[in-house]
Each structure stands twice: as C-alpha cells, then as structure tokens.
Image (cartoon, rainbow, N blue to C red):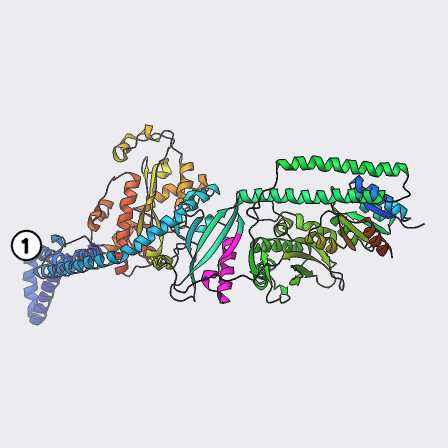
Amino acid sequence: MRRRGLVAAVLAPGVALALWVVLGAVVFLLALGPRSAALRATWRVALQSHGMLLVLWWLIAAALAGWLVRQLYGRLVRGPERLLAATRILAAQEDAASLPEAVMTTRATRALGSEIERLVAERRELRVEMARLVDEASRSVAEQRDQLAALMDELDHAVAVCNRDGRMLLYNARMRKLAGRLAVGADRVALGRSIHAVLDPAAIGHALETVEGRIARGVPASASVAQVVTTSANGHLLRVSLAPVQQAEGERGELRGYVLLVDDVTEDQQRQARRDGALLRMTERSRAAIANLQAALEMLDYPDLSPEDRERFLSVLGDEVAQMRERLLADDAEAAHELAARWPLHDMLGSDLMAAAVRRLQATAGAPITTSPPDAELWLRIDSFGLIGALDHLARRILHLRHDPVLWLRLNRAGRHAHLDLDWVVREGIPPVDPRALSTMPDEPIDGVPGTVSVRDVIDRHGGEIWVGRNPDTGRSFFRMLLPLAAVETALAEAKPGSRPEFYDFDLFTAGHGEAVDSRPLVELSFTVFDCETTGLDPAGGDEIIQIGAVRILNTRILEGEVIDQLVDPRRLIPEAGTAIHGIRQDMVQGQPTIAEALPVFHRFAEGSVLVGHNVAFDLRFLQMKERATGLRFDHPVLDTLLLSSVLHPAEESHSLEAIAARLGVRIGGRHTALGDALATAEVFRRMIPLLARQGIVTLGQARAASDQSQFARLRY
Amino acid sequence: MTRPVLIADDEPNIVISLEFMLKREGHRVLIARNGAEALDLIRAERPALVLLDAMMPGMSGFEVCEAVRADPEIAATPILMLTAKARPPDMARGIGAGADAYVPKPFSTRDLIARVRELLG
C-alpha cells in the first residue's frame, strides 16, 4: 500500500511535465490553424534527427522533480506518520522519555515533538505523584492481604476463593496439595484456572443454587453457607462448604463469587462407617441372642415339659451364652471409640429440596414433574446432593422401563421423619411396572457417581430407609424414602452488617476470566505465550521440536511463576548449523521426554487460553503436525505479535522480535532459548495491548480480524 | 386339615423355641432356613401365617415380604416380621414392605402368642 503511494508520488511530476508540454504543443498548433502544416513538417524533421535531446531533457527534469517529491514525501507524509507511531509508543509507556530524532523531519514537527515530550514529562510527574498516593493507600491493604494469606495457610482446610464462573482468585497451599491427592494434578490449582477441574461442577452448582435460594428468601449472605459432599474421580470423599461473596455495598444483589472450604473426609468416613457397622452388628446380634435366651427360658417355665425338651432348651441357653462370651472377647479388640465425624448432613428446607429435585428430574425426563406442595416449615437433615443424585437414578430407571410416564414427587411429614415419595403414572393401556423389578433398583450402583454407591447407600447415610410402597386406593407402586427431620430450626448466625473484611474490596471479582471468546476484551483474557526451538525450518520434511518455552499472561500480568521450560528429545540428529543458533546439543536432549510426552503437558498448560507467539504460524505448524500422533487438538484462538506489530506500525521496515522489542523498550534476555523468546514475546505482547486499544482494537475478535488484514498474514509454513 | 404356620429363620436356637411354642398352640409348623426356601414354601403350602426373620443369608426377610405382596396369588398371606433390626427406619421399612406386624427382638413369648392369635383371627 505505502510503497505504491510513494512510487506514484515520485513518478507524478515527470508524467505531469510530459503531459503539460504535449498539451502546450497541441494548443499552439490549433491556434496557428492552417499555417501549422508547414511548421509540423519542419518539426517532424527536427524531431526525427534531434528528438532524443528533448526526451533526455524531459527525463532530467522528471528525475529532479521525482527526487524533490521523494524528499518532501519523506518529510511531510512519512515523517508525521512515524511521529504519530512514536508518540503512541511514548504515550503508552511509562519509562520512555523522548521521541527518537529520526521521526522529526521538519521544524514544525520538531516543535510539535518537543511539545509532546513536555506533555509526556508533565504526565510522568503526575503519575509519580499518583503512584506515591496509591502506594500509601494500598500499603495498609497489602498488610491485610498478607495477614489473610498467612491466615489461609494456617487453616487446616483447603481454601479457594473463586469468582462466579469458578475461576480461582486466591487459594492456599493445602488446596494445591489436595488437588495432588485427588490425582487431578496440583498444577490445576492456579490463578485464573477453573475450580471445576478439581471439584465436581455439579456439586458446586448445587451448593451455589442452595445459597442463592437462601439469599433470595432474605437470609443474610453471611448465614447462607451451603455444604455438599462429593466424591472425586479417584474415590475420595470431600466435604465442601461454600460461602457466598456479595457486592460489598449492601447485602443485596448478585453473587460476585464464593469461598470454598474443602476437607477430605474419606478416612474419617471409612473409620466411621466401620465403627457404625460394628456397633449396629453388635446391637443386632445381642438382640437376637437375648431373644433366643428369653424364648428358651420362657419355654422352660412350662410345667409339663418332657425331659428331652428341657434338655434341648438348656442346651440352647448354654450355646447362646458361650457364643455371646466369644463375641464379646473378639469385639473388645476393636472397641468402638467416641464417635467422630459422621456422614456430613446439613439442614435444608423441604421446599428447597423439592425445587432442586424437580429441576434435576425435569432435565432428566425432559417433561414437567408433578409435585404436591410440601409442608411450608418442613426442615430436613440431609445430604441433598447425594439424595437428588439417588432420585435422579431411580427416575432414569423408571423412564427406561416405561415410555413417557408422568413422574410425581411428594414430601410429607411422618412423625419424627419425613416421607419423600417418587411416584409415577403410566399412560392408559400400558401395564404397570413389575414390583419385583422395582425392589432391586435401590441396590444398583448409581451411574455417573465415582465408587459404587447405590441409592440404598445414600439413604443409609441418612439413617433412613427406602422401600417400594403401594397405594392402597390405586394399587400403584411407588418408591418411598424415609428421611430424618432437622433436629432444630436452623438459627441464623450472628452477623453485624458492615463487618465484612477489607480484602473483598480488591478488584478480584470483576467479570470472570472465562473462556476466550471473540467478544471479550484482551485485558480480561488469559494468554499462553510460547516459542519452540526446532531442528530446522521444515516441519513437513521431518524437522522436530527440541525445546518448548511458555509463560502465562492473566489480566495483562505476566505470571512469572507459571512457565514451561522443557527440552524435548527429537529422536533424530540435531544439525550442527542449528546448534550454533539455539545452543542445544545432542547430549542435552538425551533422556528428555519425547514430544508425545511433553505435548500433553503443554496442552493442559494452555487450556482455555489464547495462544500467542512471534511468527506463531511456524510454531503452530509444528504442533499441528503432532495432533494425530498425540490425539490433542490445538484449536485455541491464536494471536501473532508479528502481525499485530504490522497492524500497529505499518510504516516500520522491520517486524523482527528484536526490532519490535527495541521499539517498545523491551530488553531481551536469553534470545534463542525457547523460554527466553517466550518471555520477550510476552512482554512485547503485554505492551501492545494498550497500543491496540488506542486504535480501537479492544476485543479478541477485533485483534484477530486486524491481524488477518495484515500484509504478513499470508505467510504459510 | 388346618393350614400350617411357617417359621423362616436361619438361627436354629430361636426356631427350637418358636416351633415348640406354636405346636403347643396346636399349629402345624413348617420351617424355612432362608428367604428363597421360605418363598417356595409359601407358594406351595399357603401357610395361615408366616413368622419371618428380617436378616437371613441371600434373600432378606424384607425382600421375601415384598415378593409375597407383589405376587397376587399369595399376596394375602399374613406376615409377622420378627427381627433384631429394631431401629425406627427398619420398623418403617418392614411395615412399608407389607408386613402385618413387626416384632423387634427380644420379645416376650406371651406377647408373641397374643399377636399370632390376633393375626390368625
């Protein structure tokens, strides 16, 4: 584009001069009229012999004029353009002090330049003053934050603070340890990553709904803590408490996020289950034994007993007593202690449980669920998450057996317990479900729940029961679950309004850093900036990756703590010529992971982020060559600092990483190591974000569209 | 020919006493050692009453009870559940499964005889 403009400008004076002379000759000849014939004849002769002289004379004039225009173009057109670009860089950076001399080509632009520099200097002074004030103001906040961090690490819970989308804004070391124990990997716990990779999203969603339901009923947020129990994929049992974080001002309004406390209660639970089981067995065995003794004793009371019968009953007594003695001695070895943690149940209003169950079952059945309105003040003591999972399992089985039944839910008080009934009505003409098929359903493992947990197990946790009931009027079968009522109505915790700790005032909860979608602003996204060193330049011709370096950017901050710096064994010789550039020798990659082992780590690292690289098409080609071998898809949105630089500074000649870094005032360390280049690219990219915003390029979609327009976007590897 | 009374229990020490007691009451007594056997005997012999233990190996008493109530042929059989499972939920389940009476162990034989007479009407 630009080149064409310059060429046109340089050629224009010559063309104009030629046109002017030719037009002058035509006008002169027309004015002469008939007398011009003689003149034309004389000219023709003269032009044939000495025409070149005229052409040369014109060429000299054209060249001179062209040279003059080129000078003027450089000073009057290019100059201001470069001054504009340099001014933008100056405006976007805090540490640059002056404009480069080369961009000021005329007296007026020099004067303009010095005015700009004066303004920038003033702005810098203001900034320094501002920074001092902010620094003072935030020092006390920082102290509180440090106290908070210390406190969080003291807690013997795993803690994570998340925004509404489940992105972690704060976590403690125990949370990372817990993720390691759950076999999801401690690296899943990182700023801006989703908690859903660590804990079951359904459980968290359930707790959130419970909390929001309470808040909607007018319970203060500070008293609206929800508990759920969930299992991890590797069978650990987790107790999760979720406390809401609301807007600081007032107790109304949207949840901004939540605090999670997570405990691994697997061992407690197993110990507890063993103890409970032992206790129950002991009680039941004793009841049976005493019944046998008592019955035999009462038989001995009959006066007309024959001697053989007497003998039989006496031997029953002897036998039972001997058995009881043996059992008692065996039980002594594993005597039950003071009870510790039970299966964590929580209090829940019946109508809340019904609402949550109806939502879940409607999604399962794809049809409305009929309910009888539950008692308004029926509080249950339950594990609502497990219970709804159990209901859902039974509903699925019923739907599987009969086409399109209407599902019913009823919840009624029954003395010190409550009856939760799952009933169904089949359509006319369809035979009812065989009750024998029903009675085994509660003992089947619930699908989708880690570990083999049956509906009966879930009900057992409540100390409840489940059976197939029969409606005496209609003869229909239904499932009836007997559940405990809450012992006391839940008392609301004392909460003084305004007693919210200061650290919530941090801007942690601003709109979530969710998935990278085109409509989101660049300043909110997370980026993985990466670079690969390779054996050569031809991925299709057998060249391989030998080093991957990557770093994450979140909130326009470079997370120095989250990097990948990995040598890779290419399983082929590294050419000498390459070693001169990247310094990686054959012996350095011996015993390093192969690309098939290293790539999944990188893929997970980059999950949910935008990939950024310098001339990234080259690196991407290498990654995509490996897609089939590793089964990974690199379909992330991609940005290229090379293209973005040409969008920002089209007038510049060079868009190499060094040139861009020099322009934006970035110092490069460790050039031509993958991590060194990735870090330099990250710093360059970070500084580009405000520059792009000045050109109206704010969202990911706009940045991608602008990149596609760039002259370099046609590079293919 | 009076219809028999069935005792379903896997513990011989209680069966001895129950059998003796029911015979003194003038009943013909059948004995089943586990749930499946009990169900077969109920189908074959149509007993006038079943004394059913909840805890038996294989098919539990609750399951026997549900199976009896689900089979229209024998659904009307009176069932008295006799069991060491005495928590309220167990009782509720026994009644829910369709037992006519639920007697927790230990029990007094005098009371039990009264309940048996009541059920045999």
Q: Is residue B64 among what the camera can see?
A: no
Q: Vertical placement of B30 versus A413: above or below?
A: above
Q: Position of residue A533 (x, y in %)?
A: 31, 38
Q: Is residue A338 left or right of residue A421?
A: left
* Residue at 40 percent of width and 34 percent of height: A594
Residue A376 left/right relative to A320:
left
Residue A342 drawn at (x, y percent): 57, 48
Q: Residues within 10 Å of mark 1 (few under 14, many from 20)?
A: few
Q: Residue furthest right?
A: B1
Please name whichever residue, A623 or A129, is drawn nearer the observer in this view of the structure: A129
The quadrant where residue A538 appears: top left
Element at badge 1? helix
The picture places residue B72, in percent across and down from the top left corner, at 81, 55
**Subunit bearing disc 1:** A
Residue A217 magenta: yes
Please report the residue visible at 52 percent of the width from the left and 46 percent of the height from the top. A265
Q: Which residue is mark 1?
A: A53
Q: Is residue A477 magenta?
A: no
Quadrant containing the N terminus of chain A in the rendered view: bottom left
Which residues lie in the magenta part? A202-228
Q: Please state which amino acid type lies under the numbered disc 1.
A: Leu
Q: Seen from this angle, which residue lies furthest top?
A: A587
Evaluate whether residue A161 shows in this view.
yes
- Above or below: residue A577 compared with residue A485: above
